[in-house]
Image (cartoon, helix red, strand yellow):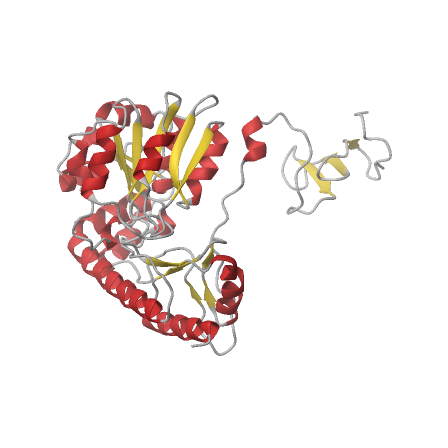
Amino acid sequence: MFPGAQGLRAEVPGAVEVPRGFYGSARVVWGRTAARGAARVSLGRRYDEPMTFQYRLRPAVRDAAAYVPGKPAAPIEGMTAYKLSANEHHMEPLPQVREAIAKASENPNIYPDPGVFELTEAMADFLGVAPENVVFGAGGSEILSAAFAITAGPGANIVYPWPSFEMYRQVGVMSGAENRQIPLTAHGRHDFDALLDAIDDDTTLVVLCSPNNPTGPAIREAEFRSFMDRVPSDLLVVLDQAYLEFITSEDAVDAVAALADYPNLIIMRTFSKAHGLAGLRVGYGIAHPDVILEMRKSIAPFSVQSIGQAAALASLRASAEVDVRAKEVAAARDKLTEELRALGIDVPTSDANYVWLPLGDRSAEFEKVCMANGLAVRNLHTGIRVSIGPDEAMERFIAVTREFLGK
């Protein structure tokens, strides 16, 4: 009997006693009711209770927190609920994209193209680069994970702005590397001097975010090139451009053009946001062929499903229409920004499909008020991020904010 298994009762014939761990007591019964040869386990632990059982896990796992997604809006009788917490596109995919999705779904028994060849060729042509400069993955998250996988590990450190995309911290901690989170400026922008000061001989990866999630500002061309000129040429730098198509600032960095001057640059982009394909998980990286080759080693084969490849290809071919819709979202964003500033909120200039309300310790209270009014927003504790939604949602959001502030 395992140590600690005393006291467990094997009430079912053939039951095997197992130790008390973080699941509490458990009985394993070998049978064939659920699946041939499967073990049925009766667990005495709630799924959301903390884990204390000491499996043979990597030490970094103990320090890592799971990604917490944006909350859905709670249904309220007589009111349309809106999810403004995940930066999703509130418009449906274009008709030709939906047609491509329907056609691609006819043969789910066939594996997707593991090389994503047709989409890669089309994207390379669209960007004006070689196919060897492009790699696809299951959303931008897999591209980010690949960059971390080939660089970060115990004994190394990674540098990124904070607050920024939560996945940087999650993947960074899981890698076992030291995470150096560099505070943003008062205007929600990257502090490039501080980022440079944090880099040393043990730094193996730097991540930048433009537009920054959750605050919204895009990185300017001049500050980006000044930073890259001072970064060691053998240090890889990821530029996360998930919200690229919503940028309207004229001085924003041209990342693809910069790639010719900085072969240590990895550009991450996605079809989840402006293309409205978040549920299909299609992201891509643009980098020097040598870097792309290494990233491919850590990207799972068949990770980009057939439907996603077909939808992304159709959406890429309709980029002009995608851009028009992105600019419509940007116009609604700018209108919301003006209205919030008129209420006295110091909203940073956003180039994404969301705005940031730096409400500090009032964030949790404001989130509850929004939820009570059928609006799910993203509470990041130091502030609230709200995604741009339909006009009705934005009008209600302003009304709720005005009432919350007593104005």
- Which quarter of the picture shows residue 300? top left
Is residue 319 rendered to the left or right of residue 26? left
User: Which is more toward the observer, 203 or 197?
Assistant: 197
Q: Please name the residue shown 50% across and 54% down the image.
A: 381
Is residue 280 rendered to the left or right of residue 274? right
Image coords of residue 264 (percent x, y): 25, 27
Please state the total of marks drawn on the protein image: 0
Relative height, residue 293 to residue 385 (above, below): above
* Quarter of the image that includes the N terminus: top right
Residue 299, can we see it? no
Is residue 87 rendered to the left or right of residue 120? right
View extreme (bottom): residue? 78
Q: Please name the residue shown 71% across and 39% down the image.
A: 23
- Which quarter of the picture shows residue 62? top right
Q: Please name the residue shown 35% across and 59% down the image.
A: 355
User: Which is more toward the observer, 65 or 215?
Assistant: 215
- Which quarter of the picture shows residue 114? top left
Residue 273, can we see it? yes
Q: Please name the residue shown 40% across and 22% down the image.
A: 202
Image coords of residue 349 (percent x, y): 29, 57
* Quarter of the image that includes the C terminus: bottom left
Image coords of residue 158 (percent x, y): 40, 30
Image coords of residue 105 (percent x, y): 34, 49
Is residue 407 rendered to the left or right of residue 351? right
